[in-house]
Amino acid sequence: MDPNEYRKEVLRETREATRAMARSVKEFRNEKKSATERALALGQAGQLTAPKDLELARDLAADRDEAPELRVAALAQLGPLLAKDRKAIPLLIKIVSSDEEPADVRAAALTALKAAAFHYSEFERHRPEYLEALRAATLADHSRLRQRALGVLAREKDSKTLKQLEEGLRRPDKALVSPQKALQLLSYDSKRNTFEMLEGIVRSPPNPAARHQALRNMGADAASQPFLAKLLRNKKEDLESRLIAMSALHAMEPKTLHKVASAVVADDDDDDDLRAACLAAMAPVAEVPPTEGLRAAAVKLATKGRSSGARSAAKRYLAQKPRE
Amino acid sequence: MSIQVLINGIAGPQSRYLGWEPVPCVLRTTGLDRLRHRSLTLRNSRAPGGGQLLFYSSPDQPGVARLTLDLRSGSGSAKFWVGGQFGFPSKANGDTRIVVFPAKNRARALLKVPCMVRVRKNANSLTGGERDRFIAALAQLNNLGAGPFQVFRDMHVAATSAEAHGREGFLPWHRAYLLDLERELQAIDPSVALPYWRFDQPAPQLFRDTFIGVSDSAGAVQFSPTNPLRLWVTDGVPGINRSPEFDTATEGAAGATEAATLASGTAFGTFRTMEGNPHGSAHVSFGGVISSVPTAARDPLFFLLHANVDRLWAKWQWLNDRFDESDPASFSDGTRIGHRRADTMWPWNEDTASPRPPTAPGGGLAMSPLVSAPGVTPTVGQMLDYQGKLNRAARLGFDYDDVPRA
């Protein structure tokens, strides 16, 4: 590819894009066009930059008489306005808070606020109102909006939200989301992942996905260590659960994992993929050299392993742990 | 060996990773070969689909496929330059070679030096081998939550956001961040380059259980049994949460297209609005950790998303010649520390005095065996001339498959 020709091609594409965006902006401004046409045009306009276009987008976003699809498209354009217009963030917060607004419009306002948290340096000033608006959105009938609001609040470690999620696990009639989703959201705050609570779910899970998520969350509580070690050795457990237990144990205490995983690798009757994963996990633990027994088991897996993945993992382990 | 090629002054394999920018080399003859050859010719031999090299008598001259070197000087050595040919990156380590042969006998190769044209590529079009090497290195860096990846996760949290977001230093800070991560990956496997996720296009090959994973209905990311990312652990919790708001197989994420982003202005002041759209838009096209600043770096996809943001900046720089940090159209200083050209960037400067964050995870930026820039304590301004267009010594040692040499 000739770089000069390529440059001409990229410049031509850029010029075409500029022209197409200008056409789209013109169509967006045209009040005689339908809301659908204007929304579509806005989606193809790139990022609006002219102040009057941004103000028009803001006014459309705020106008409850406008079609939701046009308001949704307008909300996605407000980023550059946030630093210039003091009313823009309060407008977005108001839309997210209001249960009289259509769910799609609220979700679009929430998306705009989430994006603002990435790029708007003064966003912190609005955080209290933002969190309050999110709490209001957790009560929405619309499950996607509710889940997204809960997700942001959980990542912010909002204690009220986390309590609600815990309550939903204890009392399914009060649950705002599925048990696996609630557990996933609770994983953002390690203090909420007590072994006692999670053990109950693992022993009596509402569904397999919730059980796996509860096992993942156990990684945050050191009290889970003996339970996870036992589960990793238990051949009656499904592979996914045992892999999760292995990962959680490794994150908690690599030396403990090394001890348990060595026994798994040495067991020819155990699952080859799990044995390979155990070797991969043990390889970087420099302070624990492999015993002769473990080395022999790895050699056996490297030559006689049932899957190519297991054979490769064992070979990699042996290469990483040469005999001294 | 009596004939040697030194790339960047090094004869060993660690220097044999090339980008588009030519690097200095020396062909050296000793012993009988020094007496035997008055000139030698270089050409490129490549595996099918492998990287392609160009030779340069000086970096300002056009590259050629074949170059004859005069060895009649007393030293028996000659200088030349070599770089990858734009449009022809490697797919595997050593898939392209510098072949040295007598000027008058093209059939007789005297020396073959395996090389790699290593550039950052679109994740959606990686070969299986490229994909597997990348995820294996990334998983090793994570090491089930006990590895050095935790440092990168700790750099990008709520308390550190002002160092990296919402201001002029957004693009330079993230360039240094990606470079640091990529160099750590290359220390594990030198054939790895950080791939990018073109978020304005569908990426069905990326969002697979054999690569970055497929989300279930609750947003738990699922991997194939042999995918090492299956053992990903951050903050002590195994697994990744990610819920796409779009069909990853048939759609791109919400936000401005590449052409629209490149058309968004020729001055840095307007181009940097891309921090909101498409960058912010791409982040919030998902639910899950990637959609919030404090948790985004827990998801490996985060680094592919940011590689694309960086690629867009690189492409815009190339298109508009914006490499000179003293040119206000290339960069305009902000007011906050860490967002001005001459400022060193946190955490690599280990500055924990207010208004910097109270901790600085990770120490200095990782060094490269190929280039000396930017050093362990990069400045904002050092991130601009990444190909060494204005100053060869400023080269950072990475390139993109669709951004040529400036």
Image (spheres, rainbow, N blue to C red):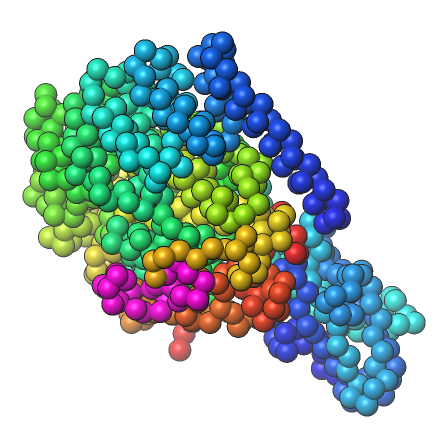
Asked if residue B211 can be seen in this view, the reply is no
Residue depicted at 70% across the width and 39% down the height: A9
Tag count: 0
- Residue furthest to the right in view is B104
Asked if residue A223 can be seen in this view, the reply is yes
Residue depicted at 67% across the width and 76% down the height: B6
Left or right of A279: which side holds B195? right
The boundaries of the magenta stretch are B338-360
Residue B80 at x, y = what percent?
Answer: 75, 72
Is residue B193 magenta-colored? no
Left or right of B89: which side holds A155? left
Residue B47 at x, y = what percent?
Answer: 71, 54
Q: Please tell me whether residue A183 is drawn above or below residue B65 in the rendered image.
A: above
Left or right of A12: which side holds A156? left
Decide which of A101, B397 is in the foreground and name it: A101
The quarter in which the N terminus of chain B is drawn is bottom right
- Residue furthest to the front in view is A52
The quarter in which the C terminus of chain B is drawn is bottom right
Residue depicted at 28% across the width and 62% down the height: B356
Is residue B350 magenta-colored? yes
Residue depicted at 36% across the width and 43% down the height: A119
Decide which of A175, B305 is in the foreground and name it: B305
